[in-house]
Structure formats: C-alpha cells, structure tokens
Image (cartoon, rainbow, N blue to C red):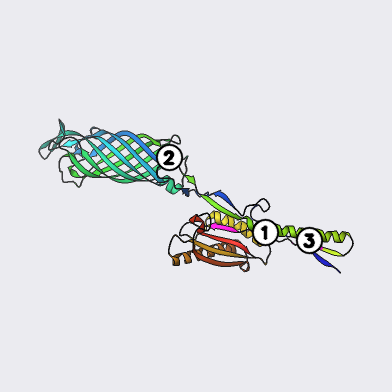
Amino acid sequence: MKKSLFTAAVFLAASSLFAQTTPTEIVIEEVTNKHEVVTNKFWNNCFISVAGGAQVFFGDHNNRMSFGDRIAPAIDASIGKWFTPGLGIRLMYSGLQVRGATQNGAHSNGKPIDGKEWDGYWLTEQKFNYYNLHGDVLFNFSNLFCGYNEKRVWNCSPYVGIGWTRVSNSPSAQEVTANIGIFNAFRVSKAIDINLDIRGTFVNDRFDGELGGRDGEGLVAVLAGITYKFKQRGWNRCNKVVIIDNAAINEMREKLNAMTEANAALERALAEGKKDVEIQTIIQTVASPNLVVFPIGKSTLSNEAKANLELLAEVIKTGDKNAVYSVTGYADEGTGSKELNETLSKNRADAVYNCLVNEFGVSPSQLKVDYKGGVADMFFNDPRLSRAVITKYQK
C-alpha cells in the first residue's frame, strides 16, 4: 500500500527569508523622482549676496539725453532663503545713483543739455542718490521644470517684489516700488555662486522731483556679484520606507522545519524496508506582506510603487494558485474628514488592485479588496506610513 510523502514547503518571500530574527525590519530606499526632496529646517539654505553694476533711468525727459549719459552706478546687497528648490525669498538693499534730465531744476548739476530745447525751456542734467529696500519672491525655473540638481551650473530664477525707496538729496522723496527681474546663478562650488541680476523697478512720477504727466518712472539695472550659501546647503532626496514582516517569515520557517523532520522520519522508514513509500514534493510560493505608501491626499501610484507591485505580482502568479491575498487601503486619521478618508482609503486599495490585475496579470480570484478609512500611527508614530495599502497573504 502506497502512501504519499509530503516534503518541505518552500516559502519564497520578496525579502530575505532565513536571515531575519526581529519581528519587523525597515528598509530605506532612495526615491529617484528628481522633483521630490526632503524639506530642510528653517535656517537651512540661507544665502547672502553682493553685487555691483549699472542702471539707466527712464524719467520725464531722459529720451532727450544720450543713452551713455544716462548710465549710473548701482550696488546690491541681500540676504535670503530657499524654502524649496523652486521657491525662495530675499530682502535686498539696492540703489546708489540716478542720472537724468530736469526741466524744473530738481537735482540739477547746472550743466545744460545742448540742443535739447523743450517748449521753450532748456533742460539741464540731474544727478541724485537714492536707495531701495525691497522684498522679492524668487522662482527657480531650473529646479521647477528640470528637477533639483545640486551640481547644475546655471540656475535661472525670475522674481517679483515690492519695496520702499528714498531719494536722499533735496528735494527728497519717498515712494513705493514694484520690482521684477531675473536672478541668474552660476555655480562655482557648493558654497559659492557668481550671480547676474537683471532688474526693472517701477516708481511714482514724483521720484525725480518733478511731475511730467507720466504714469510713473522706472529703472533698469544689470548687476554682477557673488553669492555665499550658508550650511546646511541643498536638499536630501526623499526616502521610501519598506517594512518587512519577519514574524510571518519566522512562522513559515517553523512550518518548514516541522515538515522537514516528518520527511526525515518517513525516509528512515523507507530505508528500513517497512513500507513502500512514494515521495511527492510540493513547492508552495507565498509572498510576504507588501506596503505601498501614497502622498498626502493622493491615490495615484508612483513608478517606484509600481515596480514593487510588479515584483509582488510575479511571486503571486508563480505561487499557489489557491492562495488569496488581501489588499487593504488606509488613510491618515489626522488629515481630512472621516468621509474623505473612507473614500481615499478605498481609492488607494482600488489603485493597487487594478495595477496588479490590469497591468501585471494577477488573477482577480486571488485578491480581496478592503479599506479601513482613517487610521492613526500604524507604524512608528509616522503619519506618512498610514497613507498606505498593505497586501498580504490570507491564511
């Protein structure tokens, strides 16, 4: 009489099966998305800049002067901070000198502009000192559109800002300014950039000491300088947390050992000639639990999540065809309403289910979808790990 000998079931997991002894293991993997970085502390990514150059004034009568006579020196000094690779602010002092033309004698140096009579009045050159204190919001287009790259040679950052200017010579003036420009940074080292700032400033018509019926006056400045970036500089890439359930793996190992011992006993009986034994080997493949983490408020799978799900799908398809896996969606209880979290956790579970079935060919009969709504701190008091879907084998 023949009896079947069931030897060891080999449990293949997505992680190392025999090397784990702790209940859970955390594996940190770097996210390769070029736009995802870890936001730094407030005092990180601060900088200071100084620059010098030239500027041209556009006033009531300046078109009656030669362009070269309107060029005046300009200086800048600023301190700022980048909150993200694409968004920053700065506080700046800019100014020095303005050269223009006057008809009423404001800030005149007494030198006539020959041959430039205007309505019967001769114009004279004017020169006065001023400064402009302004705050600007910078948008690093290089990082916003091309992704963060610490070693990029050229970063182009358009900006807009508002400020307050004062003419220090008599007749003095104090006006609000609007500023717009492009801040170009050329990397020299991790701490040093060479910068080129091209800026336009708009100010009230009273700025030069006389009214000419214009909507306003303006300055166009081009300055070159140097920027020093304080530590901590740059941003770290985001990391993905993968949690491996070693408790389940250890349970599988114990079953394997028990089956191995039973097999050894039957082999000894066969060797002694007591029974005619037919040996049959069954290989059972079961996937370990899989965790997919989602951004806050999202149910869209990243490329990294799809790569992990493709590996999981291969284990499921090559394993026990009768094995059923639960796909359970979760949301962070501390974010959003109860109704929103119910919908969000369901959408996340459906996204994983659809990916496994429609993209990677897992049989729908091997998957069971569930969702739990908002939960609090499933792993390590980290709310990010509650925005997840867990896929695991149902015993």
Judge whether residue 281 is colored magenta: yes
Q: Is the residue under label 2 in contact with that under label 3 (CB below 8 Å)? A: no
Residue type at mark 2 is Trp
Q: In this rendering, would 196 be left or right of 177? A: right
Q: Where is residue 271 in the image (x, y as percent from the top left)?
A: 87, 59
Q: Examine the image and state in which quarter residue 134 appears.
A: top left
Q: Examine the image and state in which quarter residue 231 appears.
A: top left
Residue at 46% x, 45% y: name it.
148
Q: In this rendering, would 188 be left or right of 1? A: left
The residue pinned by badge 1 equals: 251
Q: In this rendering, would 340 be left or right of 103? A: right
Outermost residue, right side: 273
- The magenta stretch spans which residues? 279-292
Picture disc at residue 89: none
Picture disc at residue 154: 2
Q: Where is residue 210 in the image (x, y as percent from the top left)?
A: 15, 41
Helix, strand or loop status at disc 2: strand
Residue at 54% x, 55% y: name it.
303
Looking at the image, residue 221 lies above or below residue 23: above
Q: Quadrant of the N terminus?
A: bottom right
Picture disc at residue 262: 3
Q: Position of residue 377 (x, y in %)?
A: 50, 58
Q: In which quarter of the image is the C terminus?
A: bottom right
Q: Examine the image and state in which quarter residue 4 appears.
A: bottom right
